[in-house]
Image (cartoon, rainbow, N blue to C red):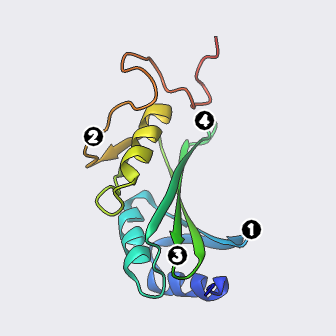
Amino acid sequence: MKVNLEELEKLVNAELTSKIQSSKIFFNELLIEVKPEDLLEVIIFLKSDDNCKFRQLIDIAGVDYPQEERRFRLVYLLLSHEKNTRIKISINFEQKNKINSITKIFSSANWMEREAFDMYGIQFVNHPDLRRILVDYNFKGHPLRKDFPLT
């Protein structure tokens, strides 16, 4: 049973009024933007609420915008098998910010957060094993940052 995205958007905005900065339906998926400090509460609600049931973390994607004040963006992609629906949660933050780990909510976030740390240098608070995963431990820098030297 596929859920009506407009109804889902209304529900999420009603339940998380103070947490949602913006929401829109784009390419048949709901995208919500939240502040980094509200991430845990939003994800817990989306996973546990009976009207949402987003119980699978598909991916955590990092983006680097070096020209912007809030340089980094993380996009969390969640799936509800019961509702046959996907949702994206986006957070923008400055380079110095540390993001709350969601490994206690979704254990699969462990590898994805380590990848974001390794490739972008994004720090996660309360991560059980935050260390490099794709490049050598002695590697200097973060290869997916836009200012990473190519030569």
* Count of residue discs: 4
Q: Comparing marks 1 and 3, which lies closer to the viewer? A: 3
* Mark 1: few/some/many CA within 10 Å (<14, 14-19, 20+): few
Q: Is residue 116 above or below residue 73?
A: above
Query: Image point 53% across, 87% down: which residue?
Result: 11
Residue on which the image places disc 2: 129
Q: Amino acid at mark 4?
A: Pro
The reply to whether callout 4 and callout 2 are in contact (CB within 8 Å) is: no
Q: Amino acid at mark 1?
A: Phe
Q: Comparing marks 3 and 4, which lies closer to the viewer? A: 3
Residue on which the image places disc 1: 27
Mark 1 or 4 closer to N-term? 1
Residue on which the image places disc 4: 66
Q: Is label 4 in a helix, a strand or a loop?
A: loop
Mark 3 or 4 closer to N-term? 4
Query: Image point 47% across, 87% down: which residue?
Result: 51
Q: Quadrant of residue 137?
A: top left
Q: Comparing marks 1 and 4, which lies closer to the viewer? A: 1
Disc 3/disc 4 C-alpha distance (Å): 36 Å
Of residues 13 and 31, the one nearer the viewer is: 31
Image location of residue 22, percent across then percent down: 59, 70
Q: Amino acid at mark 2?
A: Asp
Q: Is label 2 in a helix, a strand or a loop?
A: loop
Residue on which the image places disc 3: 81
Q: Is label 1 in a helix, a strand or a loop?
A: loop
Disc 4/disc 2 C-alpha distance (Å): 27 Å
Q: Is residue 40 above or below residue 85?
A: above
Image location of residue 138, percent across then percent down: 37, 16
